[in-house]
Image (cartoon, rainbow, N blue to C red):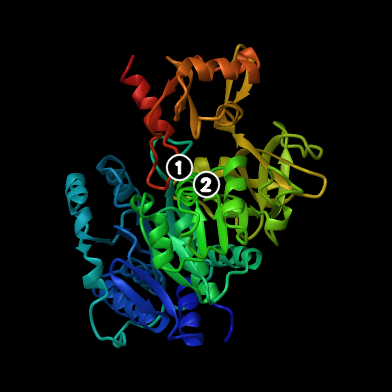
């Protein structure tokens, strides 16, 4: 069978090669690859019956479910682009997204009807269970739209440098290349079970669907709300062998494993992206799960994955996020766009088939971030990185993680690392506002004055935060990242 050229072709190939293997398990049941493909065909029929055509957008809103996965492949089969959104999306942002992408259809579970109503939504709404209902074999599905690798497969909304979420335009060819390059490095197996507690609205979560199909592995869907006391039990019950982890999930895994080291799940691979794992968490994961293959990774929605570090390289390349993926070229440049010597920090520029098309309906922003470099199209990431002499990548923070203090440039990541290096400070986040200046939020048992005193021993005076605030827990986004915007808003509320 020839290599798939569209995302739905990836599912077709998996269903043909191992139809009876478990494909996905979630709150709405378990399905083999043959059953998942049949559900996708039924969903394609339901979407087409409601007018979805090539080039349309389909918003998929709700929890991680097998039916959601089927709908994504159905949209791909019809030549439409899917837009996956978290069920925790606020009506303020959802209203913007609906107006921005102008979907032909919204597929949403009951849990999302209220937020849709708050937006004044006038787009037809279909329940995912209704979308996947019909003949068991998917008979009557519309024919596949002729394969076009450069057709838009997904709009992935992300926040960051703009006031409202912006969508990264991702084609079938770009997404398939990224998934294949990641699989080449991770070498996932048919016997693996990928535990996905990350929302499918987060590209790190979404790509677990593609990686599972690529390897013929099983996808065990969960939710970030389950990352609590029951996490280890869930991992054991679902026989999870591969765990994609953002730092908050890794911290929960370590905390629970240290309490019950005799009841650990059969983890074989742990990956990390979204934000750096601390050195302590890296050491703890390797100590608690001696046979695990831990892969620190680095990426952005605009090019999915940039680099992956192999487990055997961790001790030799401390702090590195690995070598660029095969077919991907990384260059670090100075403020004038000129390449810098190895070991020098500058802006990371990425080139390769994984560089996405640009931002949806944002030509000026696209022109700033996606432009020519050395005669080829490139992504100027805005990330501060360095490359060593052997081409290993090191992440030093985003440009917007850098702020000025007393005329000096300061990295918030450096301040956070100095804080979490203290015994008794498990997590820290620094945020900067015009009114309050740099404020460090920390968790743990130490008092603010104690943390400030220790920081004075570790940091130059101009790097010290103006204030230290100890909180019970740091707020998280739906993707499990620290929500610095919420921290800023908490400061505004105390002025």
Q: Residue at x 43, y 62 (%)?
A: 235
Q: How far across and down, in percent of the image, does residue 25 sit?
A: 37, 71
Tell me whether the residue at label 2 lies in contact with that at label 1, contact meaning CB atoms closer than 8 angstroms: yes
Could you say which quadrant of the image residue 406 lies in? Answer: top right
Residue 490: give its label: none
Q: Quadrant of the N terminus?
A: bottom right
Residue 466 as seen in the image, left or right of residue 181: left
Name the secondary structure under disc 1: loop
Q: Quadrant of the C terminus?
A: top left
Query: Does 219 appear above or below 297?
Result: below
Does residue 361 appear anywhere in the picture? Answer: yes
- Mark 2 Cα shell of 10 Å, populated few (<14), some (14-19), many (≥20): many
Could you say which quadrant of the image residue 480 lies in? Answer: top left
Residue 91 as seen in the image, left or right of residue 34: left
Q: How far across and down, in percent of the image, does residue 272 sit?
A: 56, 51
Q: CA distance from mark 2 to mark 1?
A: 7 Å
Q: How many marks?
A: 2
Q: Residue at x 56, y 15 (%)?
A: 453
Q: Residue at x 76, y 37 (%)?
A: 338
- Mark 1 Cα shell of 10 Å, populated few (<14), some (14-19), many (≥20): some
Residue 374 as seen in the image, left or right of residue 306: right
Label 2 belongs to which residue? Answer: 274
Does residue 152 appear anywhere in the picture? Answer: no
Residue 481: give its label: 1
Mark before the other along the chain sequence, 2 or 1: 2
Pick the residue in front: 278 or 86.
278
Q: Residue at x 46, y 27 (%)?
A: 442
């Amino acid at each position: 069978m020839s290599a798939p050229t569209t995302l739905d072709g990836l599912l077709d190939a998996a269903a043909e090669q191992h139809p009876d293997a478990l494909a996905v398990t979630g709150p709405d049941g378990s399905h083999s690859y043959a059953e998942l493909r049949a559900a996708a065909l039924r969903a394609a029929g339901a979407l087409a019956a409601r007018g979805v055509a090539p080039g349309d957008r389909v918003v998929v809103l709700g929890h991680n479910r097998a039916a959601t996965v089927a709908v994504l492949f159905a949209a791909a089969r019809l030549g439409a682009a899917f837009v996956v959104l978290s069920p925790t999306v606020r009506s303020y942002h959802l209203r913007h997204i609906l107006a921005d992408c102008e979907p032909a259809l919204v597929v949403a579970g009951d849990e999302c009807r209220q937020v849709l109503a708050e937006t004044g939504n006038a787009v037809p709404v279909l329940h995912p269970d209704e979308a996947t209902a019909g003949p068991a074999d998917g008979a009557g599905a519309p024919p596949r739209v002729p394969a076009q690798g450069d057709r838009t497969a997904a709009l992935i909304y992300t926040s960051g440098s703009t006031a409202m979420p912006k969508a990264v335009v991702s084609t079938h060819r770009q997404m398939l290349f990224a998934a294949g390059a990641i699989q080449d490095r991770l070498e996932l197996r048919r016997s693996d079970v990928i535990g996905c507690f990350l929302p499918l609205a987060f590209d790190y979560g979404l790509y677990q669907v593609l990686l599972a199909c690529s390897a013929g592995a099983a996808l065990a869907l969960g939710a970030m709300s389950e990352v609590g006391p029951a996490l280890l039990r869930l991992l054991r019950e679902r026989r999870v062998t591969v765990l994609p982890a953002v730092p908050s999930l890794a911290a929960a895994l370590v905390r629970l494993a240290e309490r019950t080291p005799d009841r650990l799940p059969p983890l074989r691979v742990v990956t990390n992206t979204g934000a750096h794992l601390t050195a302590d968490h890296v050491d703890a994961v390797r100590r608690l799960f001696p046979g695990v293959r831990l892969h620190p990774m680095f990426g952005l929605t605009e090019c999915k994955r940039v680099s992956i570090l192999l487990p055997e390289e961790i001790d030799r390349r401390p702090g590195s996020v690995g070598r660029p993926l095969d077919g991907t070229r990384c260059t670090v440049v100075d403020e004038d766009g000129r390449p810098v010597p190895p070991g020098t920090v500058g802006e990371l520029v990425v080139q390769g088939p994984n560089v996405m098309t640009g931002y949806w309906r944002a030509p000026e922003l696209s022109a700033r971030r996606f432009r020519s470099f050395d005669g080829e199209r490139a992504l100027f990431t805005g990330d501060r990185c360095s490359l060593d002499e052997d081409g290993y990548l090191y992440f030093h923070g985003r440009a917007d993680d850098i702020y000025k203090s007393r005329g000096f440039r300061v990295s918030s990541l450096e301040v956070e690392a100095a804080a979490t290096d203290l015994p008794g400070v498990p997590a820290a986040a620094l945020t900067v506002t015009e009114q309050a200046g740099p404020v460090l939020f920390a968790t743990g048992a130490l008092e603010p004055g104690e943390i400030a005193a220790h920081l004075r021993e570790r940091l130059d005076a101009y790097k010290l935060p103006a204030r230290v605030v100890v909180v019970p827990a740091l707020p998280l986004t739906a993707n499990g990242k620290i929500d610095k915007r919420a921290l800023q808003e908490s400061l505004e509320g105390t002025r």
